[in-house]
Image (cartoon, coloured by chain):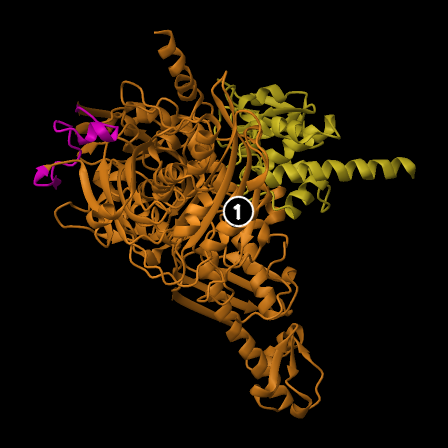
Chain colours: A orange, B yellow
Amino acid sequence: MNVVDNKWIGQRTIRPDGVDKVTGRAAFAADTTMPGMIWGKVLRSPHPHARIKSINTAKAEALPGVKAVVTSRDIVDFTIEKGAVMLGIQDMRWMCRNVMARDKALFPGHPVAAVAATSEAIAAEACKLIEVDYEVLPWAIEIDDALKDDAPILHEWNKFDGKPSNIMGRLESKKGDIAQGFKDAEIVIERSFTTRPVHQGYIEPHACLISVAADGKTTIWSSSQGQFMVRAMTSMLTGIPQSDIRAIPAEIGGGFGGKTIVYLEPLATLLAKKSGRPVKMVMTREEVMRATGPTSGSKSTVRIGAKKDGTIVAAHGTYYLQAGAFPGSPIRGAVGCSFAPYDIPHVLSEGYDVCSNRSKVAAYRAPGAPIGAYAVECVLDELAEALKMDPLELRLKNAAKQGTKAAHGPVFPRIGYIETLEVAKKHPHYSAPLGKLQGRGVASGFWFNAGGESSAQVNITEDGNVVVTTGHPDIGGSRAGIANICAELLGIDYKRISVIIGDTQTVGFSNLTGGSRVLFASSMVVTQAADKVIATLRERAAKIWEIDPEAVKWENGAAHPVSPNAGEFKPLTLADLAEKAPSQGGPIGASVQLNTQGAEGGFGTHICDVEVDVDLGIIRVIRYTAVQDVGRAVHPSYVEGQLQGGVSQGIGWALNEEYIYNKDGKVDNPGFLDYRMPVCSDLPMIDCALVEVPNPKHPQGVKGVGEVPLVPVMAAVANAVHNALGKRFYSLPMSPPKVSAELDAPVQQAAE
Amino acid sequence: MAKLHVTTTVNGEPMEFLCEPYDTMLDALRGQLGLTGSKEGCSSGDCGACSITLDGRLVCSCLMLAAEAEGHEIRTIEGMATGDRLHPLQQKFLEHAALQCGICTSGMLVASEALLARNSNPTEEEVRFWLAGNLCRCTGYDKIVRAVMETAAEMREQGIQEIRQ
């Protein structure tokens, strides 16, 4: 550990970008303008599934004010036959077809053309003048429909078990022999579950402003979870080399995984190139809901076998996840995470990636893991009930710990899962009395967390302050964490540190803001850069004092002799050394680029209380406590914020949020009124208990915290509802119509 | 159709602008007036990110026509701080980390200020119901509600002190 005394790590400092955000100054993508700017609009398919026979743009191009029109002919084609071209987890064959339909439109909202014009109104008018000749095809949206023998096939070239299929892939994690395991079991519980597609629900619609100069130099301002991803994808889809594309990260108004791919940027770049004018594109909320994200709908079956004493001996999970129009549903998360909290000798976890005529799935906070955990953690609740065990005791008895081999591969190092269970068990919430029609549920969850590429620069200004530049869009307060760590390392007030998110041409490659990786990875590179800066500062002081650098220590923001034996010198502060820099070797700064390793997985355990209004079928969460092993809470407020935000998204997923489709295969609720995310009056305070088991592989002990908090929520709510009503819901959301129908069911039976 | 000429007051300053009859107040603020602190999250009055006050009344500027500003007083997030002195709500939002991405923050602050203007001692339930028209997807509202309650308490305390002085 580099950090000894922790003056700043763990403090609730004011975030560096805070004042800009409370005064309306912060520039989000849609807030940016350029002289000569024009507006781009997308024409989208009205059909869930249609062959595009021809597109005629002549009338649109002739409309006064229209400056450019693009179709799939303008986008670089990554042909199916040539095989996968991967950028991270995205296959560019699907990306090129997702940003603009080629031979077929695969969901309502699929882009088929884009127009740039001198006003938004003219661009919208021009879209109406584009003639698309569609051959409308049969379609399938729900998983069961897409899996039928006679289902319409989205990708005719794809075969599964030797037959054309919408199953695009299968993944499994295996440990031991489940057949043997279930033979050993004294009790076996098997249940099936479904969840609906839900949207990430960021409040800021996708937006970008793009300028392409006559020499091809391209500048992109956009809202994304990775300016380098924007640069690479835009380059690959337009043919402009990456060195010519400067992608500037605007402040991002929420992403939750949904802004880890591009939608508008390649289109706006091509429109800007064709028109010679900067092009701005901003999605409407309806476009966001129809054509971006969401995460998968799912159907799962989970079977768990145990001994009578509660020892789990076998587990089998099967998860079908909707990928939407192109392959890539998060089966890895469902398969890998669902049983990870438990030490089970025999495990088989299998996932199927199912295409259907819905927008292509995008990552959503611990992708796939909440779907798997909903099924597994509900079955565990039933197991505990059947065995008459406390549900936390059942989990404690089977908890993964240091040395446990997870079915998805790794052997866990020191982890804090057991601590989360123990904290939950002792928490006053767990023993608080419940009222009538109230119930309590618990559930746990795991997420892998990620490391990967990060770059940082730490520069000392001429007046002895500090500028830190990293390459990750700050989506939830990561700049505040970096400021705390840098202040700690350099021994100065955090207010003297300016934390900046660099653009693609000013900071080294930094991978996505995603996978709960940003503070883990960026603080690792910032720490190494700060260590280099401190080494330089010590060398400079040593030179001035004419002593050995080893005889100089850096403490409280100044160089000191390590002991009186080294000599008696007045400490040299950062400001002193900055002032002397020109004559003592030049500017002081360091940059570090790393592929960071050692991001350990995270665990959480949640307690949820609900109250059911049996007349209206409304379930209200009345108390919630999230316990999580967070490694090290560098800025506790923003760690709590991650937990509270994840929990509220999970409550929405559990109780209300869902995509509803009409008979034409279109989303019927593409707005915030009918797609019902939790509002302030829906929620209680969300209590957090932070367990800190430091990550031994990180200089400050940091573990990712952002995604784990969504994983246990739906199960915790479902288990609480079961506790309140004695009835279990095997499908989400537990919305008022469904709850009312369920509550009315026995009454109807009695009347018959 | 000719553009409409609108004379209004924004954050205490006289303003004039031209607009289309169909332009919303949000269009005029973000476009003609360059006040991009008010955000567009839905353009249907569901998210509250564009919250402003019209003669002291909280409205979604995406649901108001720009032409309706004629002769009225508009206040936006840009008018909340006094010079470099933040409004107590702004300060408390920072201290409580009551924002993550910040896209809803302008609307939350404008709505919260409108609440405290009419109710200096709101209960948690009153805060939650008042802010139910302002969506936040990042925070789970916990720290926002705490920040508003604590600001109200401090403003009451200061108000009492000012009266005593």
The residue marked by circle 1 belongs to what chain? A
Residue A516: tell me if it is visible. no
Spot occupied by residue A247 in the image (x, y as percentages of width and height): 40, 52
Which image quarter: residue B139?
Answer: top right
Q: Which residue is mark 1?
A: A425
Q: Is residue A90 above or below residue A53?
A: below
Spot occupied by residue A414 in the image (x, y as percentages of width and height): 43, 63
Spot occupied by residue B59 in the image (x, y as percentages of width and height): 61, 24
Q: Is residue B64 above or below residue A521?
A: above
The magenta-colored residue range is: A136-163
Q: Would residue A99 appear left or right of A609 to someone viewing this image? A: left
Using the image as rendered, state which of residue A445 and residue A34 is in the foreground: A445
Using the image as rendered, state which of residue A276 and residue A432 is in the foreground: A432
Q: Helix or strand or loop: what does disc 1 sit on?
A: helix
Residue A212: tell me if it is visible. yes
Main secondary structure found in the magenta portion: loop
Using the image as rendered, state which of residue A605 and residue A545 is in the foreground: A605
Residue at (71% x, 29% y) in the render: B122
Q: Identify which amino acid the numbered label 1 is placed on.
A: Lys
Is residue B136 found inside the magenta-colored segment of the image? no
Q: Would residue B102 appear left or right of A362 to someone viewing this image? A: right
Is residue A156 found inside the magenta-colored segment of the image? yes
